[in-house]
Amino acid sequence: MFESLIGLVAIIALFVIISRQQSRIGLVERELGALRSLVLSGAVTPAAKPFEQATPDAAPADMAPAVAAGADIPSPAISEPVAAPAPAMEAETPIGEVVSGPWAPSEPASTAAEPAAPTAAAKAARQSDVETALGTRWAVWVGGIALALGGLFLIRYTIEAGIFGPGVRLTMAAVLGLVLVASGEFIRRTGFKVPVQGAAGAYIPAILTAAGAFILFGTVYAAHGIYGFIGPALAFTLLGAIGVATIAAALVHGQALAGIGLVGAMVTPVLVASQAPNPWALFGYLAIVLAATGVIARMRDWTFLMAAAFAGTGLWTILYMSDAAGMQLPVVLFIDTVTLAVLAFVWLSSRGSEADAAKNGFDWPSIIPGAFVAFSALGLSVDSTLVAAGDALPGALVIVALVATALYRPRAVPLLHAAGLVTVMIHLGIIPPTTIGSDLSQGNLGFDGMPVAAGNALTLRIGIGLGLVFIGAGFWAARRFAAGTQIRAASWAAWGVIVPLVILLALWFTFGNLDRDLVYAAVAALLVVVFAAGGEWIARAEEPPLKGGIAVSFALGGAAIAGLLLMHMAFDSGWTTILLGAAAIVPALVTRWRSYPVLGWISVGAVIAVLGRVAFDPTIVGAEFLSTTPVFNWLLPGYGVPALAFGFAAWQLARTTPTLPRAGNGRPRLAMEAAAALFALLTVAMLVRHAMHGGVIDTGAMTLAEQAIYTLIAIGAGAILVAIDMRSPSSVLRYGSMAAGVASVAFIVVRHFVVLNPLFTDESTGQIPVFNLLFLAYLLPAVAAGGLALYARDKRPKWYAQMLAVVAAVLAFAYATLSVRRLFKGEFIGLWSGLGQLETYTYSALWLVIGVVLLTVGVWLKSQVLRIASAALIAIAVLKVFIFDMSELEGVLRALSFIGLGAVLIGIGLFYQRLLTRAAKEG
């Protein structure tokens, strides 16, 4: 296990070093490519000033970063001026001596001598780069790993051969580790230089120091875990000291060495076992490691090192909290506090001004402490053992600390998201979404009827406190960033409304009366005022003022949702639906004074809320409370008031368009127009169904009479929308009118002709001769569809009018045919009652007459589609006469059938001849 652990650490270190050096190689390749482009484009001429005249004191401009970086090395890396190189050495010696070290920049491309042949020079550069990588960098890296493993294998050999005792072997290993560390420091202090271009990444002092650290880690662990020479306390102290010292040595040796030290420091508590572990010693040690890593990472701006330190500390915290019974609350609060303090006062200290924060966005390493600290707060808040002991309050304090840190350090905004998400999770745990509404009457709102969080007064107070914290911090920070960073302002405003609303909803379900609770309704009303005022307060700080950006949209949207909760808490089902519809007027009226884009969409949100209400309960007040009185019942205001409100809101949004273009016109107005038309249709349709079913709208099969009324409503709605669109053009009205027409045609084809056709259902057509079911279901829709087709001829696409004309003709044909059958069969006209000879002949004569009428009307109206319909109907009549009548009719009826058919056809022929002759004369 000892060898596997050492090999794993070596592999990780090798991976880190190789990854870092690959980035350096990539940078050098890009610079060489840029140099080649300059050479090929002629930007660099062969007459440039010879490099041998340059000195470090008069370096070119592009060498300034290299000189400056070299000056940061603690030891005097550049100890003497560089002599002018001979021409033969120009390919190997750059302007100044290349400085080696963890921060030495890659060699500037401009220091290369101008090649005589660009292609040959590029090829030689690539070969040289590969040779440098193999001969210098890779050799050094592999050599360092070989030293570390060699020392460990030497210890193993002495063990197997029995040459030395354990004490001597461990002493030799420790001496070897110390010698490697001292060698690395000696080479660095004596002015270590790499005279070969491209080999600066192979920093030999860092490699030697890392190898020595590996050997020292292994030695101490062997002394404790294998031989038992030292106790847990001393082993823990030595391993921690080696890890911290290795991290500190990274200040002069680079980030890779710091990573090795951090890994060793974080693994130390695992390597050292104790019979009576002390959590304060463990987390005190982790706090020291985290703080030391934070200082070093801040000095060198090593983000990956800082993120790794936060991750290691967080993993230890969660591992410790997994044993809730043996966990000590002060220990968790201590390490959470240290984590946030290191983030706020060490890592993010002096990392740029507010402008830089706005430009650079957020600090991604802060995601890791935010996630782990928030997770610990979640555990403190929902764990049954801790909550029963009253420890939910510390969890809330940790959430407040996350918000405060994010407020103090703007770039730590991930902490805000973590705090908000955990707070929502905690309060949704009281009412898990999977069981909401499953058994509210019994109060079963949690998993298996048991709430996750304790429903006591402490939870109520914590919820109120957290809500106030998010409201205050969210709106204050949103106003602070409104003029500069809209996304950050929107983040604060969003959590400033989401968290209080979720808390209010959770507390209402847990402690309130679900039928009606005026106390929680008052709280919701207060939130409406606070959110609306907060949105206005934020808008006044925008640039330009009152622009109504994303943060303002979140605030006003939160006010709208709070208003929705208010209505559900304070009123019963019927009044809630009516008031929700009427509430769409409020944001539309506000557009008279404010041009916030969100206002129109809030009205649309009211439409969605009302649609959800009526979909859940179409009776508005419940089937048992709905009156049977026709028209004047809850359906009239439940559907009619929202229809009127949506129409007024659309009208108001259209009025505010010229002066406030961002708030009124566009998609919200079109959506409100569509909603108004939809609810107007629903009002009439629901009242019809209510009247025809004796006050019951949610049961009973639909009849043909009821369907006929719905069809007439749809056709009438299409005509009304066309008329309104002519006065106030709107794409919603245009396409909505055509949608109503298409829907009415679909109803007719599917339900009038097939599903509910009395010829198939044998439904009673009524006892009155003319004004019966056939009149309502076929003749009136035929007249309505024909009238709409005629009215829409020049106002809608040609196909639309033709479709309606065809449907009108077919409805008239169906009415005439079914009326003939009713004349012969009476009230019930089912197909299975058979056909008589006189009835059969009557159909033939009737169809020929209808065909002639259609032809006449088509010629009069200049409608080709009616003329084609007439031709089709006459063709059907011809087929019927020759196929059906010839076999079924007898005697005079058969003769009259053919005589009538022939007369009609000859008359049609003469009619068309006269039309063509007249057309020829007029032409």
Image (cartoon, rainbow, N blue to C red):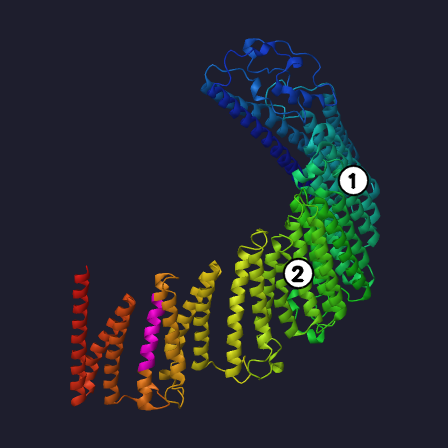
The numbered dot on residue 560 is: 2
Q: Residue furthest front?
A: 922
Which segment did they paint magenta?
A: 802-816
Residue at 57 percent across and 84 percent down: it is: 629
Specify whether residue 808 is painted magenta: yes
Q: Is residue 409 left or right of residue 867?
A: right
Crowdedness near tag 2: few (<14), some (14–19) or many (≥20) residues, C-alpha within 10 Å: many
* Image x and y of residue 713, in percent: 46, 74
Question: Is the residue 39 above or below the residue 906 in the image?
Answer: above
Question: Is the residue 589 above or below the residue 112 in the image?
Answer: below
Amino acid type indicated by mark 2: Ala
Crowdedness near tag 1: few (<14), some (14–19) or many (≥20) residues, C-alpha within 10 Å: some
Is residue 193 visible to us here? Answer: yes
Q: Secondary structure at mark 2?
A: helix
User: Where the N terminus falls, by quadrant?
Assistant: top right
Q: In the rendered image, which quarter is residue 664 located in?
A: bottom right
Give the Cα distance between marks 1 and 2: 39 Å
* Image x and y of residue 220, in percent: 77, 37
Between 246 and 275, the one lying in front of the other is 246
Main structural element of the magenta stretch: helix, strand or loop?
helix
Q: Please give the residue where the numbered disc 1 appears in the rendered image.
A: 345
* Image x and y of residue 680, in percent: 52, 70
Q: Is residue 6 left or right of residue 333?
A: left
Is residue 277 visible to us here? Answer: no
Between 215 and 743, the one lying in front of the other is 743
Of the two numbered discs 1 and 2 on the same chain, state the one appearing first in sequence: 1
* Image x and y of residue 794, in percent: 37, 62
Q: Is residue 282 left or right of residue 560?
A: right
Specify whether residue 370 is painted magenta: no
Residue at 47 percent across and 21 percent down: it is: 41
Question: Is the residue 903 above or below the residue 663 in the image?
Answer: below
Amino acid type indicated by mark 1: Phe
